[in-house]
Image: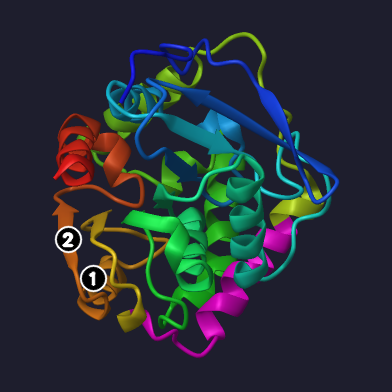
Amino acid sequence: MNATRLATTWRDAPTQFANVDGLPFAYRELGPVGGVPVVFLHHFTAVLDDWDPRVIDGVAQGHHVITFDNRGVGASGGSVPSDIAAMGADAVSFIRALGYEKVDVIGFSLGGAVAQMVALQAPDLVRKIVLTGTGPRGGGGIDKMSRIVGWAYLKAFLARKDPRHFLFFPRTTEGKRAANDYFARLDERTADRDQPISLQAGIAQLRAIVRGGKAQPDDLSVITQPAFVANGDHDLMVASEHSVDLARRLPDAQVTIYPDSGHGGIFQYHREFVPAVVEFLDA
């Protein structure tokens, strides 16, 4: 790894655009240039500004980090497909458009499902894979996402809060504190903010999640790259046992379940998650 560095913090990383099959894809990068880049894939309805700065900055201390809006998300062009496999193909096209032949991939929630597609569709492209708050395609219960999300959005509307207060964190004293801290961190970036998620994008993503829950399971035994799987122990969106099942299906996987946390367990436990991921990537 050479000494050249990009932006040093997530707060200051400029938004750039890559031409992917004739469409602009928004992305940001930071950290030292060289070695194997780490590509982040984000969650349902998320745009670039929804990544936790502590996670991004922590990994970028020693790694070249790239985050991006997939097709139709945020400032990226096109329309979001309602199929996870198509999202995976778009992610592969983006990585290759930047000229990389080997990357590490970190996917959270829907991004974890897309990361699995990247590894299945382009195994030569992936060195290591981190899958958080996610499960295997065809996992039971994932197809109930519409009801879970709808109920959370109703509670959020009545409480005048972001739905992730109810979807990502337990409604305990510690969970509420972790949620408030998380949203305070998201507000640290004040300039060059991303465009919000569109209605079309959110609906298409939800359809893709439901369709993925009802799909035939993938043969994950062909993903032979080392995998790090993590989740909270009370995940409302992707039941924690699905993450354990995911790790069991992968030939070379380790799994961490964080206590007293939910879908956003990696954000609630970012002080533990980041060094564990860095150790995994550097091993």
Residue 42: give x, y in percent of width and height. Answer: 51, 46
Q: Quadrant of the C terminus?
A: top left
The residue tagged 2 is: 255
Residue extending furthest bottom? 216
* Label 2, residues with CA under 10 Å away: few <14, some 14-19, many ≥20: some
Q: Is residue 256 left or right of residue 126?
A: left
- Residue 123, quarter of picture: bottom left
The residue tagged 1 is: 247
> In whole angstroms, how far apart are the C-alphas of marks 2 and 1?
6 Å
* Label 1, residues with CA under 10 Å away: few <14, some 14-19, many ≥20: many
- Residue 235, quarter of picture: bottom left
Residue 59: give x, y in percent of width and height. Answer: 30, 30
Q: Is residue 68 left or right of residue 123?
A: right
Whether pointer 2 and pointer 1 mark residues with C-beta atoms closer than 8 Å, the reply is yes
Residue 194 visible here: no
Q: Is residue 213 above or below residue 185?
A: below
Residue 219 among those drawn in magenta: yes
Q: Is residue 242 above or below residue 78?
A: below
Q: Amino acid at mark 2?
A: Val
Residue 14: give x, y in percent of width and height. Answer: 61, 16
Q: In this picture, which residue range is highlighted in magenta? A: 203-220
Q: Is residue 154 above or below residue 18?
A: below
Residue 13 among those drawn in magenta: no
Say which label, 2 or 1, has the lower sequence index.
1
Name the element at disc 1.
Answer: helix
Name the element at disc 2.
Answer: strand
Q: Quadrant of the N terminus?
A: top left
Q: Is residue 7 left or right of residue 26?
A: left
Residue 33: give x, y in percent of width and height. Answer: 42, 23
